[in-house]
Image: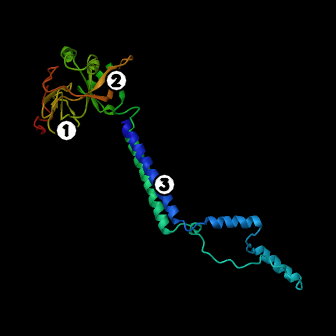
Amino acid sequence: MAVVVLAAIVLVLLAVAAVFVNLRRRDTERAVGYLSRETVARDRSNERRGQVAPQAVSGRELERSVALERREPSRELATVGAGAPVAWSPPDPEQLGVNRRQFLNRGIVTGMLFGLSGFGAAVLAFLWPQVRGGFGSTIKVGKIADIKTQIAQNKGFYYVPEGRMWVTEYPASALSKARNTYSPSELAGMEKGLIALYQKCVHLGCRVPSCATSQWFECPCHGSQYNRVGEKKGGPAPRGLDRFAMSVDAGGNFVVNTGLIILGPPIGTNTTGQEAEGPHCISSAGGEKK
């Protein structure tokens, strides 16, 4: 993941550099003319000899000469700033502003920069790991006794939306079989009487609801069925429900790591021996029972 983040940053920086070089080249191509080395040397030589080009007469000097002529008509006025008239040259377009083509080009480049920046920020936000809360993090569900109370009040099932998981009770009588089947990360919760199951069906990813009458999980999409601890009982599912790594902290809280998903047990696993305790909500063929 770190390599992907680094690659995204490099791509954004290369795109910004390419746009900057393109703008620089356009400015260079728009430049018209330059002073030759001989011209620059001649100008410097004239400045050292005191040969300075005649300056244009300012408006203030012209007004002063006219006022002096009115006061003393017989006095010969000195010529101010005598010299050949300066040929008119059109003003520099850069001083007047940008034309329509320049405005459109700069607008397009600016839009590209904003787009690349937004894309880069979105990529980084998507790849950046979550540091707190929500699915993918470690969630402290609560005290074990309180969770079991919630399970009883919800007819055998307790849903935790923050972790996209179902929490159910694991019977102590089945622990001897469980120790031969499940990993230590799963047994850490089972030995305290709880198990945390991922809500997604392992067949095609539908969210699996609980069935209060059968006391199983029954998928409404294609009829996959799992017992109360997530072991596969029927339908096209290739295994039991996936589950999360579980633990109990020093304060007696049930902690679930939703960033570590453990694949469900293989077909045929039945540690609890639980059969349907009533009518099914969904038939194993995939249709809802009448």
Q: Amino acid at mark 2?
A: Val
Residue 135 falls left or right of residue 26? left
Residue at mark 1 to residue at mark 3: CA–CA distance: 48 Å
> As drawn, is 164 to the left or to the right of 64?
left
Say if 176 sits above or below 4 in the image.
Answer: above
Q: Which residue sits furthest bottom?
A: 74
**Residue 38, x across and y down, in percent:** 64, 66
Tell me the tag on residue 20. 3
User: Which residue is the site of mark 2?
Assistant: 255
Identify which residue is drawn at 53% across, 66% down. Answer: 98
Amino acid residing under circle 3: Phe
* Residues marked 3 and 2 touching at CB (< 8 Å): no
Coordinates of residue 200 in the picture (x, y in percent): 24, 34
> Which mark is on residue 204?
1
Q: In terms of image quadrants, where is residue 205?
A: top left
| Amino acid of disc 1 | Leu
Q: Which element carries disc 3, helix, strand or loop?
A: helix
- Residue 26 appears in the figure: yes
Crowd tier of the residue under label 2, counting other residues whose Cα lies within 10 Å: few below 14, some 14–19, many 20 or above:
many
Q: Quadrant of residue 123?
A: top left
